[in-house]
Amino acid sequence: MPVLAGIDGCKAGWIAVHCALGTPPSVSVFPSFQALLDALPEATIAVDMPIGLPDLSSKGGRGPEALVRPQLGARQSSVFAIPSRAALYADTSAFTTVEAWYAAHRKASAVAIATSDPPRGVSIQAFGIFAKIREIDALLIARPELHGRVFESHPEVAFCQLNGGKAMALPKKIKGAVNPAGMEERKALLCQHGYERGFLDRSPPSGATSDDFLDAAAMMLIAGRIASGAARPYPDPPLTDRFGIPVAIWA
């Protein structure tokens, strides 16, 4: 049976909600994206992580971001711009101190400013996921066959699509803390699309948070839409970066 997997980054690595088509879903955490691919070798994967990087960043990001933001209303700030590939690879150190982390952020911002028009630095939010973006990027450069089964999506774009084109009314987080009302709104929508409430109410695996879990669950539904041909890429057709990696947000 076809295997579907929805993926989100988490503190322990990557959280995956996955299933063979027509069977109940499972949830797992993997320490690396390679480990995830090894465990789910045939899966169609939708992942909440930017895929495909520009050489020059323009206003609003790579292109997909500017297309999906208008759909999201008050939730559009969840879609942030991704700088150039050079900025993402400006410092690949494993940071052992806060000072080193901020120094690397400043270095990445300097490169981003030099490779963007208009000049723009790197947000703290975007910099926090650079290592995970690079992890997927390296695999897609080395293994072009993955381009046909690893797809970028975005949770708020996914929830909007699953909600008939209407953005979620409530934020998932407020000042960095999970918002119970926003989580409830999203759980109710996921249940409308086939999830059992008991599955969504379980505690997430160690190393992942409850919002990581819900985002991965939404991503799995998008993986199903991709596998069935119902999903739409933004833009359509997708762009490609200089390595031939497709650049699009799917929903």
Image: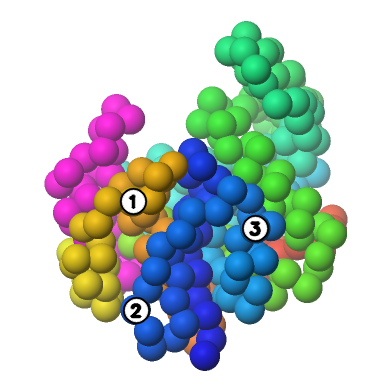
Residue 66 can be seen, yes or no: no
Going from N to C along the chain, the mark reached first, 2 or 1, is 2
Q: Magenta residues?
A: 160-187
The residue at which mark 2 appears reads as: 24
- Residue at 45 percent across and 70 percent down: it is 18
What is the three-letter code of the residue carrying label 3? Answer: Ala
For residue 204, the mark is: 1
Residue 188, horizontal then vertical, whole percent: 18, 64
Left or right: residue 80 versus residue 186 is right
Query: Spatial distance from mark 2 to mark 1, Cα to Cα?
Result: 16 Å
Quarter where residue 78 is shown: top left
Residue 1, horizontal then vertical, whole percent: 52, 90
Q: Is residue 47 magenta?
A: no
Query: Spatial distance from mark 1 to mark 3, Cα to Cα?
Result: 19 Å
- Above or below, 179 against 45 in this view is above
For residue 35, the mark is: 3
Quarter where residue 60 is shown: top right
Left or right: residue 135 versus residue 210 is right
What is the three-letter code of the residue carrying label 1? Answer: Pro
Residue 161, horizontal then vertical, whole percent: 36, 68
Residue 132, horizontal then vertical, whole percent: 63, 43
What is the three-letter code of the residue carrying label 2? Answer: Pro
Q: Is residue 177 magenta?
A: yes
Left or right: residue 37 versus residue 162 is right
Which residue is most to the top? 99
- Above or below, 117 against 7 in this view is above
